[in-house]
Amino acid sequence: MHLTQIGKRRENPSLVNHHFTPIGLIDMYNSGGAIEGLLCSHQPSVCKIQIKIRGCGRFRAYSSSKPSYCKVNDEETKFSYNTEDGMLIIQLEAKGDCDTREIAVVY
């Protein structure tokens, strides 16, 4: 895994020097193997990280700051963020066969 720098924006100083690294589904043996894709997009006032992930359980990522909100398949979802270690956790509920989902982390 590598650390992704997600902002160097002159338009919005709050988007400067954020870092994000997806870890994966932490209850799996090969947690990073659940990650199928990662995309970062910037707009003047928003930075959005999109992660395609296959499976169910607890998704964990390192984030240098707390996101404004998170979505799973375009539905806003609860998340926990630990300010001491930068760990972001999103619970991916088992619905059906735990197919591929898209997580959006928005700053």
Image (spheres, rainbow, N blue to C red):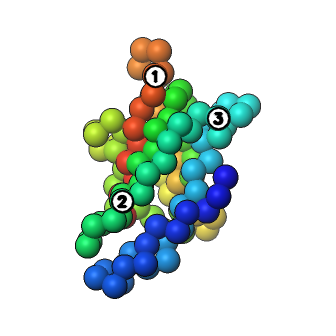
Q: Does residue 22 sit above or below 66 in this rendering? A: above
Q: Is residue 79 left or right of residue 68?
A: right
**Residue 72 image offset from top left, x and y in percent:** 36, 39
Q: Residue at x 52, y 29 (%)?
A: 54
Q: Which residue is mark 2?
A: 41
Q: Earlier in the sequence, mark 1 or mark 2?
A: 2
Q: Does residue 37 sit above or below 8 in this rendering? A: above
Q: Which residue is mark 3?
A: 33
Q: Amino acid at mark 2?
A: Ser
Front-most of 37 and 96? 37
Q: Residue at x 27, y 67 (%)?
A: 43
Q: Which residue is mark 1?
A: 99
**Residue 62 image offset from top left, x and y in percent:** 58, 58
Give the image quarter of residue 32: top right
Dot 3 lies on which element?
A: helix
Q: Quadrant of the C terminus?
A: bottom left
- Structural distance between the alpha carbons of marks 2 and 3: 23 Å
